[in-house]
């Protein structure tokens, strides 16, 4: 009986994940911390993070957090700009197309120099968060989202992104 319940629950969860729409996504974020020490300003937080967050029906924000020193950045830095909602909608479409809610890292090779990588897709208040350390065989899906968010930052902001979106 327990196996039957587990199968039904899995079917319901899978169906609900498939039914999600880009309009249901309220935030998409990616982050990375390389394994080498860069003198973090705030221990325990990623070296870099990019978030795209819904502010209202027609408004979103891109938020960039830099937690390591680099040219012109001498303290923890957070920058935010407002963008049209279609920017979040496209990020949400990518996340859902790439099945990032269900995605799991495979063939993980860990080593200190690889650090931590992750992303989060927040759907109607439910956070779907994945974090992994090291290289993974199936990183194409999260890498596609990361590179899109890096391109958004490169196109709209003057903030150097050095770690996110790299192989």
Image: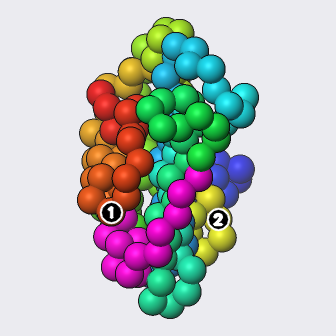
Q: Where does the image place residue 64, in percent across and percent down from the top left? A: 50, 53
Image disc number at residue 87: none
How many C-alpha atoms fall within 10 Å of the one at disc 1: few (<14), some, or many (≥20)? few
Q: Is residue 98 magenta?
A: no
Q: Secondary structure at mark 1?
A: helix
Q: Where does the image place residue 109, in percent across and percent down from the top left? A: 43, 14
Q: Is residue 117 above or below residue 3?
A: above
Marks 1 and 2, the one that precedes in the sequence: 2
Q: Quadrant of residue 85?
A: bottom left
Image disc number at residue 156: 1
Residue drawn at 38 percent across, 25 percent down: 136
Q: Is residue 95 above or below residue 46?
A: below
Q: Where does the image place residue 160, in percent across and percent down from the top left? A: 38, 42
Does residue 139 appear left or right of residue 58 in this picture? Answer: left
Q: In this figure, which residue is indicated by the disc labeled 2? A: 126
User: Is residue 20 or residue 75 the one in the foreground?
Assistant: 75
Residue drawn at 41 percent across, 71 percent down: 88
Residue 8 visible (yes or no): no
Q: Where does the image place residue 57, in percent across and percent down from the top left? A: 50, 90
Does residue 144 appear left or right of residue 33 in this picture? Answer: left
Q: Quadrant of residue 79?
A: bottom right
Q: Which residues are magenta?
A: 78-91
Spatial distance from mark 1 to mark 2, Cα to Cα? 28 Å
Q: Is residue 97 above or below residue 65?
A: below
């Amino acid at each position: 009986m327990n196996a039957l319940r587990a199968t039904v629950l899995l079917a319901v969860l899978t169906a609900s994940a498939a039914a999600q729409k880009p309009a249901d996504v309220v935030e998409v974020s990616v982050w990375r911390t390389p394994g080498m020490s860069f003198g973090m300003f705030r221990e325990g937080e990623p070296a870099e993070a990019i978030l795209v967050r819904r502010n209202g029906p027609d408004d979103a924000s891109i938020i960039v957090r830099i937690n390591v020193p680099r040219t012109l950045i001498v303290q923890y830095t957070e920058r935010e700009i407002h963008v049209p909602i279609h920017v979040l909608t496209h990020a949400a479409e990518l996340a859902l197309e790439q099945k990032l809610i269900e995605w799991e890292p495979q063939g993980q090779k860990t080593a200190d120099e690889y650090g931590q990588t992750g992303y989060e897709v927040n759907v109607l208040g439910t956070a779907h968060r994945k974090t992994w350390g090291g290289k993974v065989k199936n990183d194409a899906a999260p890498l596609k989202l990361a590179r899109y968010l890096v391109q958004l930052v490169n196109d709209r902001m003057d903030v150097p992104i050095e770690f996110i979106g790299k192989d």
